[in-house]
Image (spheres, rainbow, N blue to C red):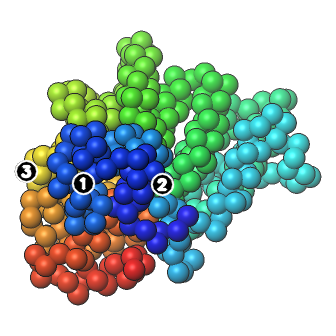
């Protein structure tokens, strides 16, 4: 899909297709006509997922129609694994369809021990937001695991399914980041199958956590909220055994619920779930990363910044951002997410020089993550056209690297 049109122009096109004038869209959004005008002509950035989600909902379109995803870049490195999407799609299709292993052909898969090591390596690439390198190895991992999982005589089949769940999580994250949301659904569906086959509470909870993630990316906020609440109810009966992994997954699910409620603009519920997660995080090791959730104290505080941003509370974004010891989290993706949330909050506070500095920091840490995020691209466009800061050279250079013509 081309990004020749801006997000605002895409909003205007979707509005006209419904036969609405700007006043009608303003009424549906509970906003002013002036706000709609500024959104459509690019004078106001769409830098909050909650607002983008509501626009998509009232205009009856999917998120990518408004964002213009997927984006393509000039170099293979910054293209973030796009070139491997066809191979990943085929691997996931074979992994999910009945008899899919029979379509792979004759090949000897790597052993489960070898695949466990490959999955661990892939998880490190995913946390470092090195999606091109991840795309080079992930389809093959999923293909080999499909062969193992299809072997009904395999004594360690549960291990194969557990590894499949972890691999498909990475496929889901990659797909959603790059804007291939249908592929994200395929990946999470295979995760749910793996969890059901094994039946272990932690796998069930991990797959539910990822289901919430794919719904959040699709702006299906009621679905994300309901999935998180249902999973929390399911996990509750197992918490008495004192398993720290289940406790961490419970905290991660509370964070999913907090984000969903913040995008639904329900501050009370969002803050309640955030508080639950904070209490759990204090009980667990500071560097926790169960099932790639990065559930720990630092990530909980990063989520607090995001919640305040989605609720449209810029002062809270700033104050909460100051409490995040971001260098302590071992994830380039999470660090970059923090800096982009902080940038949006600074822009909302009219501290645009600091917003630019935060964006540049995020881009240095994880460019493949930053340059594929629609809300970041909208913010960069807005800062590029603004005359309210002294970072014009830096912003124009960043916009050029992101191919924002």
Which circle, 2 or 3, is nearer the viewer? 2
The residue at 17%/75% (across/down) is 386
Q: Please say if the residues under marks 3 and 1 sit with CB atoms less than 8 Å apart.
A: no
Say which mark, if any, is on residue 36: 1
- Pointer 2: what residue? 65
- Dot placed on the residue nearer the N-terminal end, 3 or 1: 1
Secondary structure category for the residue under label 3: helix
Marks 2 and 1, how far apart at CA = 17 Å
**Camera-side residue: 384 or 162?**
384
Q: Residues within 10 Å of mark 3 (few under 14, many from 20)?
A: some
Looking at the image, which is closer to me, 4 or 179? 4
Q: Quadrant of the rendered structure where residue 94 is? A: top right
Q: Residue 315: which disc?
A: 3
Element type at mark 2: helix
Position in image of residue 171 (x %, y %): 58, 50
Measure how far apart labels 2 and 3 are at the Cα level. Answer: 31 Å
Q: Are marks 2 and 1 in contact (CB under 8 Å)?
A: no
Q: Position of residue 384 (x, y in %)?
A: 24, 77
């Amino acid at each position: 899909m081309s990004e020749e049109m801006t997000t605002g122009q895409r909003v205007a096109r979707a509005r006209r297709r419904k036969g609405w004038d700007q006043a009608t869209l303003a009424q549906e959004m509970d906003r002013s006509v002036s706000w709609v005008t500024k959104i459509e002509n690019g004078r106001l950035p769409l830098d909050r997922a909650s607002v983008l989600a509501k626009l998509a909902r009232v205009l009856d379109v999917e998120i990518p129609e408004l964002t213009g995803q997927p984006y393509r870049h000039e170099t293979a490195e910054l293209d973030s694994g796009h070139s491997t999407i066809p191979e990943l799609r085929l691997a996931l299709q074979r992994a999910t369809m009945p008899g899919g292993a029979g379509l792979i052909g004759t090949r000897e898969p790597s052993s489960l021990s070898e695949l466990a090591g490959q999955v661990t390596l892939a998880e490190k690439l995913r946390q470092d937001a090195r999606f091109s390198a991840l795309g080079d190895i992930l389809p093959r991992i999923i293909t080999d695991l499909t062969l193992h999982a299809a072997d009904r005589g395999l004594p360690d089949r549960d291990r194969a399914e557990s590894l499949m769940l972890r691999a498909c999580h990475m496929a889901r994250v990659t797909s959603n980041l790059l804007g291939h949301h249908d592929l994200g659904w395929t990946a999470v569906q295979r995760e749910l199958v793996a969890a059901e086959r094994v039946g272990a509470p932690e796998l069930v909870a991990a797959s539910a956590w990822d289901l919430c993630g794919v719904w959040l990316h699709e702006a299906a906020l009621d679905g994300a909220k309901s999935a998180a609440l249902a999973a929390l109810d399911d996990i509750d009966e197992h918490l008495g055994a004192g398993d720290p992994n289940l406790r961490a997954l419970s905290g991660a699910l509370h964070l999913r619920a907090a984000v969903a409620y913040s995008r639904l603009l329900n501050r009370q519920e969002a803050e309640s779930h955030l508080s639950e997660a904070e209490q759990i995080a204090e009980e667990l090791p500071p560097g926790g990363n169960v099932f790639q959730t990065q559930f720990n104290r630092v990530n909980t505080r990063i989520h607090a910044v995001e919640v305040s941003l989605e609720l449209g509370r810029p002062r809270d974004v700033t104050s909460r951002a100051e409490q995040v010891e971001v260098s302590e989290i071992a994830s380039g993706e999470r660090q970059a997410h923090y800096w982009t949330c902080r940038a949006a909050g600074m822009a909302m506070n009219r501290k645009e020089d600091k917003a630019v500095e935060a964006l540049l920091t995020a881009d240095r840490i994880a460019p493949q993550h930053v340059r594929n995020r629609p809300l970041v691209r909208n913010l960069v466009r807005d800062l590029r056209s603004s005359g309210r800061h002294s970072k014009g050279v830096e912003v124009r250079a960043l916009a050029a690297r992101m191919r924002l013509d």
